[in-house]
Amino acid sequence: MDETHAVRLTGVSKRFADTYAVRDLNLDIEAGLFFSLLGPSGCGKTTSLRMIGGFTDPTEGSVLLAGEDVTALPPNKRNVNTVFQSYALFDHLSIADNVAFGLKRKGVEKAEIRRRVGEMLELVQLDGFAGRKPRTLSGGQRQRVALARALVNRPAVLLLDEPLAALDLKLRRQMQVELKQIQREVGITFVFVTHDQDEALTMSDRICVMNEGRVEQCGTPEDVYEHPASRFVASFMGTSNLMTGTYRGGEVTLDQGPALPVGPRAAIADGTPVSVSLRPEKVWLSDFEPGMSVLRGVIRDTVYSGPTTTYLIELAPGVTLSVLEQNTARARMEDRWSGGETVEFGWRPEHCLVLA
Ligand SMILES: Nc1ncnc2c1ncn2[C@@H]1O[C@H](COP(=O)(O)OP(=O)(O)OP(=O)(O)O)[C@@H](O)[C@H]1O
Ligand SMILES: [Mg+2]
């Protein structure tokens, strides 16, 4: 038995009628991690989470929790708890009673319940709210009650299905930080579902990127962002300049444009059609260093967005590259281009990635 894996899915598939929602999913989630399932709408995130929780039976494969095969066990026999997107609090109960609900049903002693509920409300920074009703709380506060209610049973694993989706952007950012802090404090394994790549990048120890029911890539936030395993991951994680061309001897000749030196990539035969990805922030517009690839192009558009400015540079007829510059204190605004200028731009070959 491998106890270091809080959750292990082996060969898990789920078919609804004749379509697969999840196909041959293999996941190892190490205990104590903040683990995210990330992908576009309909890619199978909720279905995967429901199979871990026991709310949906897999068509094939097995689900292990802390080394124990729980595939045939109902949700209440699994040491997990779930926070859903609609956090369904009991409106007629006080905040304290909402949090205490599961403990009462289990027959936990009164004094113990009071102690643990107090502890949880403190953890989610709602001490002082114990006697209030859910309707008198803000969205973010209600979300924290839902979290306290799910954590009070001390599950080994907490499943969270887009728990922040209903919150406005500012509150969501704040809750992302808080949720991550709470996870560190309690040390419980979190399996967090989101379709928001920024959210996954900021919160997770590990990210599993899914697409059409399959895993595209699993790794640390840095792995999936800096070393995307596929064209899908490169385009889903942040923005990327994606181009197509033909590989030959360490260069990719674009379908409509020049040859770009690219990073090392094992075993690609010359003449293979490939995609290349170059992140906007990996392209420089000045101060080039030896070994960099430098080309010339025409600035076609500039988009100022506060801390950054994005330039659209045409490097060949119909081929534009997005380039991101930081507007730091050292960058002089009067040096910014307005459009129409011919400029040099460069990148390190290892940042020009060849993708499957
Ligand atoms: N009970 C069901 N019956 C039939 N099809 C279903 C059922 N539940 C999910 N599906 C289908 O399975 C696929 C995956 O759904 P799932 O809810 O897991 O996606 P998701 O990644 O959570 O998407 P979202 O980000 O929109 O919540 C979808 O195509 C969906 O229509
Ligand atoms: Mg979903």
Image (cartoon, grey):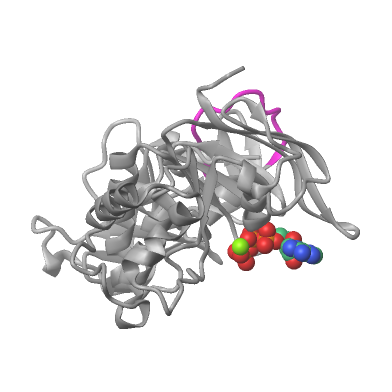
Indicate the position of residue 139 as horizontal and vertical percent values.
35, 75
Direction from residue 329 to residue 74 in the image, left or right: right
Quadrant into which the C terminus falls: top right
Q: Observer-nearest residue: 351 or 146?
A: 146
Q: Is residue 263 magenta?
A: yes
Q: Observer-nearest residue: 252 or 213?
A: 213
Classify 356 as above or below 300.
above
In the image, what residue occupies the spot 28% across and 71% down?
Answer: 170
Indicate the position of residue 28 as horizontal and vertical percent values.
58, 31
In the image, what residue occupies the spot 31% across and 61% down?
Answer: 175
In the image, what residue occupies the spot 42% across and 65% down?
Answer: 164
Q: Observer-nearest residue: 252 or 191?
A: 191
Classify 253 as above or below 166.
above
**Ligand 2 picture quarter:** bottom right
Indicate the position of residue 217 as horizontal and vertical percent values.
59, 40
Q: Is residue 295 magenta?
A: no
- Quarter residue 68 falls in: top right
The reply to whether residue 340 is visible in this rendering is no
In the image, what residue occupies the spot 62% across and 54% down?
Answer: 45
Q: How many marks?
A: 0
Classify 119 as above or below 343.
above
- Quarter residue 338 falls in: bottom left
The reply to whether residue 127 is visible in this rendering is yes
Q: Which residues are magenta?
A: 258-273
Magenta region's main secondary structure? loop
